[in-house]
Amino acid sequence: MGELDHWQPVRTSRELGRRPLGVRLAGQELVLFRTGDGAIGALRDVCPHRGMRLSLGTVQGERLVCPYHGWRFTAAGDGESPGTPKLYACAEAFAALERHGAIWVKSRHATARFPRLEPAGYFPVRVLRHTVRAPLEVVLDNFTEVEHTGTTHLFLGYPTERLAEVETRVETTEDSVRVINRGPQRWLPAPLERLFQIRTGDVFTDAWTTCFSPVYTEYDQWWADPRTGAPRPYRIKVFVFFTPRDGESTELVSLLYTSAPRWGRLGLNRLLEPLLVLLVDLEVRLDRRMVENLADKRPSLRGRRLGRFDKALGENRRRLARIYYGCEEQAVL
């Protein structure tokens, strides 16, 4: 198996309109398009006739039309030439579908299951996409430890001066790595405390599970009163997918959910959604800036001086190798 053998989110649904869209996945150039009936097509972004980029073409009915000579292709890759009607032409096609506000692609012949993304008791808010100029492994490292939250983040995380108080635990299975962190919530401005009903100094639990077909992390974040232990009413769940564009950049597709019904609290929750989207988008952008400023972006962990918050990194590497890349576990350590 390899990167293209797993269902990968490559764009949000909002980004794919009626025009073809070129994307890069694991070093491969693909074209996405939406047919007149709404079906999603994904082809190699090169016309088998003379090598034109199909992403520069147009969609006419159920076919993608090459801008060079007008050759036409279905979502399955079956093509026809207007100048040579009896000629059978075929463009390499990929399996593609639209779910959860995103466009997903994998190899047509791969048998990987689609990830389960329907959290009970949560309500969908938004799908976000960010591009990070760093390899998948390095980006995943950042998103699976909390030691950086005090210096990098503005709101979600633990204060650096109290990191020694944060409890962290790693649990593993054959195909997943779970990390549970528990400690004092860093400073929050008073308006955010009131709106989201959480407080600076609350016990903040930041727990996540990373899976590897495809590579994604499911985050559960909740707060509790530090004196009574009573949980605060607002909880957040985020699925972050790590999709390699190539060896030097990674797409992040984030599916954001909350435990708050949209029209609860007399409609206030509906008004909070845009604010929550802005906050999550800001925090991811801060992560991106920090990762892109690394002096050494080599994926290997050899020679690194790792601390207690980095225990999951090696576990992630072993499962990346075996499950995601389909190679020996030591190949990506």
Image (tube, rainbow, N blue to C red):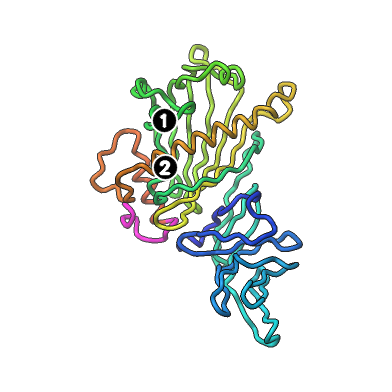
**Is residue 88 depicted above or below 140 in this figure?**
below
Q: Residue at x 56, y 18 (%)?
A: 193
Disc sitting over residue 188 in the figure: none
Query: How would you rate the neighbour count of disc 1 (Cα within 10 Å): few for under 14, some for 14-19, many for 20 or more?
Result: many
Q: Residue at x 45, y 49 (%)?
A: 175
Q: Main structural element of the magenta stretch: helix, strand or loop? A: helix
Q: Is residue 319 left or right of residue 70?
A: left
Q: Is residue 325 magenta?
A: yes
- Reading the image, the residue beneath label 2 is 172
Number of numbered discs overlaid on the protein picture:
2
Disc sitting over residue 149 in the figure: 1
| Callout 1 amino acid | Thr
**Residue at the far top in the pictured view:** 227
Query: Start and end of the magenta stretch?
Result: 323-333
- Across and down, in percent, residue 19 comes to 67, 60
Q: Is residue 92 magenta?
A: no
Q: Secondary structure at mark 1?
A: helix
Q: Residue at x 65, y 70 (%)?
A: 76
Q: Residue at x 61, y 64 (%)?
A: 42
Q: Nearer the viewer, residue 166 or 295?
A: 295
**Is residue 200 depicted above or below 87 in this figure?**
above
Q: CA distance from mark 2 to mark 1?
A: 23 Å
- Across and down, in percent, residue 300 comes to 30, 50
Q: Secondary structure at mark 2?
A: strand
| Callout 2 amino acid | Thr
Circle 2/circle 1 CB separation < 8 Å: no
For the question of whether residue 164 can be seen, the reply is: yes
Q: Earlier in the sequence, mark 2 or mark 1?
A: 1
